[in-house]
Image: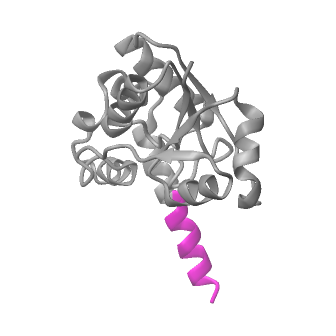
Amino acid sequence: MKINVFIGRFQPFHNGHAAAINYVVDRSDVVMVVIGSAQKNHEPDNPFTAGERLEMVLRYLDWIKPKKPVYPMPLDDITNHNLWISHLKSYLPRFDEIYSNNELVHMLAAEANVKVIPVPLVEREELMATRIREKILSGGRWEHLVPKPIYEFIKEINGEERIRAIARAREDVHISNDSSK
């Protein structure tokens, strides 16, 4: 049985993540979807909680109904990158390969003799969580960049307003720091 791992932050989960999961499922018997940086939330680059990101993945999986088992799980970062692969292994069942495009993941896995396979990037100019958050901030159209159940979920939890509020709070901090000089 081939157990493979796909790692992402999913801030938010978008159509590129969906394509990647489908790609990994096609090459696996079981897929572990690791929701990285689980401890981060309510930040400009990480507006959603681990639980919300887990729910995004679960809603997507319920929508597509994959024919193979897919298990999402959150995983906190650790500060010692040299131990990250060991950290990952301690939270997961034995696995065969990691699917990721993250250069640090590739480097750390290579040092630990773990095979990492890049995932084909789909519409990379548009399908980046950073761009989606920017579109939300500017009031642009973004619903076509995420699967329908994810769009509905973000609306349900008032995620657009959270992203805007976090950005405003960050501006307030910069303004107050500048005025104290």
Q: Is residue 177 above or below residue 92?
A: below
- Say whether residue 7 is visible: no
Would you say 91 lies left or right of 133 here?
Answer: right
Q: Is residue 61 magenta?
A: no
Q: Choose between 81 and 116: the one closer to the eye.
A: 116
Percent position of residue 137, x then y: 35, 52
Identify which residue is drawn at 24% across, 55% down.
125
Residue at 26%, 43% (x, y): give it.
122
Which colour style is shown?
one colour
Q: How many marks?
A: 0
The quarter of the picture where residue 73 lies is top right
Magenta range: 169-181
Q: Residue at x 63, y 31 (%)?
A: 95
Which x, y percent locates residue 162? 48, 43
- Image quadrant holding the C terminus, namely bottom right
**119 relative to 96 in the view: left or right:** left
- Residue 174: say if magenta: yes
